[in-house]
Amino acid sequence: MQSILNVRQELSKKVAQKLVSHSFTIISDDCWGGVFYRYLNLPYLTPTVGLWIKPADYIKYIENFDHGHQEPLIFQTTAKDYPVATLSGVEINFMHYKSQAEAQQKYTRRLLRVQKDRQFFKIDFGKPGYTIDDIRRWNKLKLKNSVAFYPSTMELPEEVHNGIAVSDWSPNGALMFDITRKYFDLFQWIQSGRLEKSLLYTVFNALLFDPTAPKRIFTNLLYGQPAATRLNLTPAPARAES
C-alpha cells in the first residue's frame, strides 16, 4: 500500500510540474508558498520563505512590496532565538534562520529572483491578529493574482476580494497547502490568476494531487463517516532551503 502511495506522490509531482509552464513569485504570510515551491521542486523565487510577518505588518508589506525594498533590513536585539529585522517599518521574523548573516544573505538573494511581471499574493484572514480594517485594506488593493483564505465559520463585514471560505481551515500553513487545493485549481491560478475549480480538476485532485484523499476515502469506506473527523495530518518534513 505504501509503495502505491509513493508512486502516486511522484506521479503527482511530475504532472504538476508539466501544468506550470511559467516562473512565478508567491508572496505569502506563512509557509504555504514555500510548500508550493518544494512541491514543484523549484527554486524559491520569493523572499517570503522561512520567515513570518505578523498580520498588520503583512498588509503593509504587500502594499509596499514593489518599492519597500529600497530600504535595508535593520536587525533588532530581541529575546527570540532567531533573527528579527524591520523593513520599512515592517517586522520580519526569520524563524527558520540561524543567524542575521544567513537571513540577510538569503533574503537578498531571493529578492533578486522575484518575477516582477508574475507576482501572486496569498493571505489567510483566519490567522489571529487580522482585523476588519485589514480586510478592507486588502479589498482596496484589488490584487489580480491573489487569493485570500478564511474559515467558513468566520463572520465577515463584507465580501473578501478573491476570498475562499475553508470549512476545514487550519492555522498550519503547510497543512493549508494540502487543504486549500481542494477549493480551487491551484495550477490554473498560477498560470492565469483565475480562481476556478472545474469538475475535471476536482477528479484529478482526488485521484492524484491531494495527499489526504487516500486516507480520507479509506476512512469513509471503513467507518462510514467523514474522514475529516479522524484525519491526523502532519506537516511536510523540513527540507534544506535554496
Image (cartoon, rainbow, N blue to C red):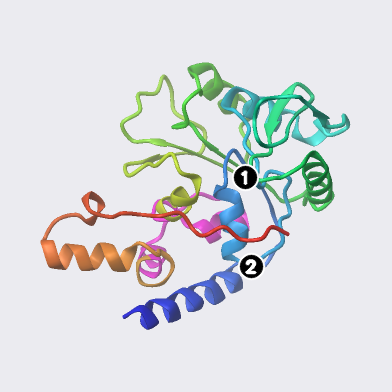
Badge 2 local density, few (<14 within 10 Å), some, or many (20+)?
A: few
Image-based side of 212 in relation to 236, left or right? left
- Residue 64 image offset from top left, x and y in percent: 75, 29
In terms of image quadrants, where is residue 99?
Answer: top right
Instruction: Point out which mark residue 41 bears.
Output: 2
**39 within the magenta span:** no
Residue furthest out toward the top: 133
Tell me which amino acid carries mark 2: Asn
Q: In this view, does 164 lie above or below 62?
A: below
Magenta residues, start to end: 181-205
Badge 1 local density, few (<14 within 10 Å), some, or many (20+)?
A: some
Image-based side of 204 in relation to 48, left or right? left
| 236 or 129, nearer to the observer | 236
Instruction: Point out which mark residue 145 bears.
Output: 1
Q: Is residue 150 above or below residue 40?
A: above
**200 within the magenta span:** yes
Q: Which residue is drawn at 20% across and 63% down?
A: 219
Tell me which amino acid carries mark 1: Asn
| 195 or 235, nearer to the observer | 235
Asked if residue 241 shows in the view, the reply is yes
Q: Which residue is drawn at 36% across and 72% down?
A: 207
